[in-house]
Image (cartoon, grey):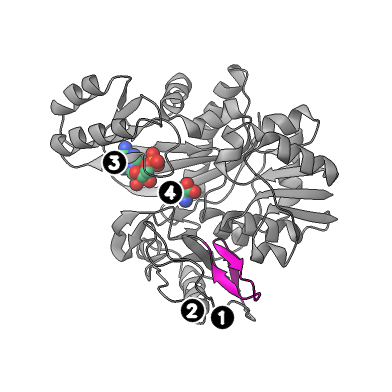
C-alpha cells in the first residue's frame, strides 16, 4: 500500500514510524512532515488544512490510504474531500469531528447517548452564564469551539468563574457558547478507540501530563509526557468504557447520519462514581500516540485501513507486555512565546529500547538540527515494567541537549505510585 500521513508533530512521526514497519507498506509519504519523519518517508510540502491541496497530493501520489493526524484539517473538511474523491482516509468527516470542535455539540451527543459526563449547562449569553456562576462555587468554564487548549478554566470559586467567563467571552472568536460544568475529581485517563463508523477496537489506556512542571504545577500545555498502560484502569475497566462511552457515541453519531470513522479519543476522569467524559477528540492524542505505538504489538496499517474502508473486526488488540513512557522536551518559553533556531545535540542514538520522535525541529541552512516549535521532541521507551521503561526513557533524555530545554522529571510517577506491576 501507498500511504500519506498528514501532519508534522510527534504524533505523526510516531504513526509514520509504526506504519513504516508494516509488511503491507510499499511507499510512505509525509506532508508536511519533519526532519524525523524525513528519515523514514518521503516528505512533501503541504497546506495540511486545505482540503483541495491534500486531495491533490493524495491523487498525485496515488495513495491507497491517507492518515490525518491533527484536528484542524479534519474540522476543515479534509476527510470529506478525500472521501468524495474516492480516496480511503483514516479520520472523521467535519460533521463527526464536531465531537472535538464543539463542546456544546459533544454534550448534546452524550446526553442523547446516555454517556456519563460532568453535569453542565450551556449558555449562549455571557451575562446569563455570569448570573448562573454567581450562584455556584467552583466551576469549570469551557468556551465552545477549538481553542488550542486555551478554552478551559477550572475555577476554584464563583469569583474566578465569573472572571473566566468574562475573559473567554472576550476571546469571542471561538464562538458565543459557553459550557459551565461541575468540577470532577479523580485520575485523568485517555482512552482511544479506532472506529470504522460502526465497530471499534480499543487501544490500551494512556495518561497525559498536561501541566508544564513536576507535581502537576505550572500552566497547562499540549502535554509534557505520557505513559501507557494506566494501572488505574484495568482491562475490565477499559472494556466498560468501550461499552458505556465509545459504543453509544458511535451509535448516536451513525443515527444522526454522521458515522465516526477514525480515532475517537475520550478524555476521562475516573471518579469514585465511575468514569466520566471530560472531552472528546477526533484524533490520536499527542503525546499519547507516541507511547501507544510502542505498546501496540500488531500492525497498525491494516487497522487504520479497515477503519477507512468500514471493514473493521471488533476484537481485543495485541499489546506488548510491560509499559511505555514518553518524555516531551520543550523549548525555552513554552507554552508562551518561544525561542527557536537553537541547535539540538544527541538525537542520533544509537538507542536500545528508546525512540526519539520529532515535533518542533528543523534543519538550518547548514543542515544542523535546530528547534522550530514549542514541543521539540518526545523521547520514548518501552520496557518490561513501567519502572524500566521510565529509566530507559530518562537515560535517553540525558544524552539530548538544547539550550533552555524544559522537561518534567516525573512522567509516569503517578502511575508507578498507583501500583503498576513491578
Ligand atoms: P478539556 O479540554 O475539556 O479536556 O479540558 C482540559 C483540562 O481541563 C482537562 O484535561 C482537565 O484537566 C480539566 N477539566 C476539564 N473538565 C473538567 C471537569 N469537569 N472537572 C475537572 N477538571 C476538568
Ligand atoms: N494530549 C492531549 C491531546 O492530544 O489533546
Observer-nearest of 413 and 8:
8
Q: What residue lies at 65% left-to-right and 66% top-to-bottom?
A: 36
Q: Which sits earlier in the primary sequence, circle 3 or circle 2? A: 3
Are discs 2 and 1 less than 8 Å apart at CB?
yes
CA–CA distance in space, label 2 to label 1? 6 Å
- Which residue in the structure is indicated by mark 2? 401
Element under disc 1: loop
Residue of label 1? 346
Q: Position of residue 299 (x, y in %)?
A: 73, 54
Report the Cα–Cα distance between label 4 and label 3.
19 Å
Tell me the quarter of the image containing the C terminus.
bottom left
Which-is-in-front pick, marks 2 and 4? 2
Spatial CA span between label 3 and label 2: 33 Å
Q: Earlier in the sequence, mark 1 or mark 3?
A: 3
Q: Which mark is residue 189?
A: 4
Q: Nearer the viewer, mark 4 or mark 3?
A: 3
* Callout 2 secondary element: loop
Where residue 241 appears, as percent x and y from the top left, is 49, 38
Left or right: 188 as drawn, with respect to 130: right
| Residue shown at 28% from the left, 44% from the top | 185
- The residue beneath circle 3 is 153
Say which label, 4 or 3, has the lower sequence index: 3
Label placed on residue 182: none
**Is 367 a magenta residue?**
yes
Amino acid at each position: 500500500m501507498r500511504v500519506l500521513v498528514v501532519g508534522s508533530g510527534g504524533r505523526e512521526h510516531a504513526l509514520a514510524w509504526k506504519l513504516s514497519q508494516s509488511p503491507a507498506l510499499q511507499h510512505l509519504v509525509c506532508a508536511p512532515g519533519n526532519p524525523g519523519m524525513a528519515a523514514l518517508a518521503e516528505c512533501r510540502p503541504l497546506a495540511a488544512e486545505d482540503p483541495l491541496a491534500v486531495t491533490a497530493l493524495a491523487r498525485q501520489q496515488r495513495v491507497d490510504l491517507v492518515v490525518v493526524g491533527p484536528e484542524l484539517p479534519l474540522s476543515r473538511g479534509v476527510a470529506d474531500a478525500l472521501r468524495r474523491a474516492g480516496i480511503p482516509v483514516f479520520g472523521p468527516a467535519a460533521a463527526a469531528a464536531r465531537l472535538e470542535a464543539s463542546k456544546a455539540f459533544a454534550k448534546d451527543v452524550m446526553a442523547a447517548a446516555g454517556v456519563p459526563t460532568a453535569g453542565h449547562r450551556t449558555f449562549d449569553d455571557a451575562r446569563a452564564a455570569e448570573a448562573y456562576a454567581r450562584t455556584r462555587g467552583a466551576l469549570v468554564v469551557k468556551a465552545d469551539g477549538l481553542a488550542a487548549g486555551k478554552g478551559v478554566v477550572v475555577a476554584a470559586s464563583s469569583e474566578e468563574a465569573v472572571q473566566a467567563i468574562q475573559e473567554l467571552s472576550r476571546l469571542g472568536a471561538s464562538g458565543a457558547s459557553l459550557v459551565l460544568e461541575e468540577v470532577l475529581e479523580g485520575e485523568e485517563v485517555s482512552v482511544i478507540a479506532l472506529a470504522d463508523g460502526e465497530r471499534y477496537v480499543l487501544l490500551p489506556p494512556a495518561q497525559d501530563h498536561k501541566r508544564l512542571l513536576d507535581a502537576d504545577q505550572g500552566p497547562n500545555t499540549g502535554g509534557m509526557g505520557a505513559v501507557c498502560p494506566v494501572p488505574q484502569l484495568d482491562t475490565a475497566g477499559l472494556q466498560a468504557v468501550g461499552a458505556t462511552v465509545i459504543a453509544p457515541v458511535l451509535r448516536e453519531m451513525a443515527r444522526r447520519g454522521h458515522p465516526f470513522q477514525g480515532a475517537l479519543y475520550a478524555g476521562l476522569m475516573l471518579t469514585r462514581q465511575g468514569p466520566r467524559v471530560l472531552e472528546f477528540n477526533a484524533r490520536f492524542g499527542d503525546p499519547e500516540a507516541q507511547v501507544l505505538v510502542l505498546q501496540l504489538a500488531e500492525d497498525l496499517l491494516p487497522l487504520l485501513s479497515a477503519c477507512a474502508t468500514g471493514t473493521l473486526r471488533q476484537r481485543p488488540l495485541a499489546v506488548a507486555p510491560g509499559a511505555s513512557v514518553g518524555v516531551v522536551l520543550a523549548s525555552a518559553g513554552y507554552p508562551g512565546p518561544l525561542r527557536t533556531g537553537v541547535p539540538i545535540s544527541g538525537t542520533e542514538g544509537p538507542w536500545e529500547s528508546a525512540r526519539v520522535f520529532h515535533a518542533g525541529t528543523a534543519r538550518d541552512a547548514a543542515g544542523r538540527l535546530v528547534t522550530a516549535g514549542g514541543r521539540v521532541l518526545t523521547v520514548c521507551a518501552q520496557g518490561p515494567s513501567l519502572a524500566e521503561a521510565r529509566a530507559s526513557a530518562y537515560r535517553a533524555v540525558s544524552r539530548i541537549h538544547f539550550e533552555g530545554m524544559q522537561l518534567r522529571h516525573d512522567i509516569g510517577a503517578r502511575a508507578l505510585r498507583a501500583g503498576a506491576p513491578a
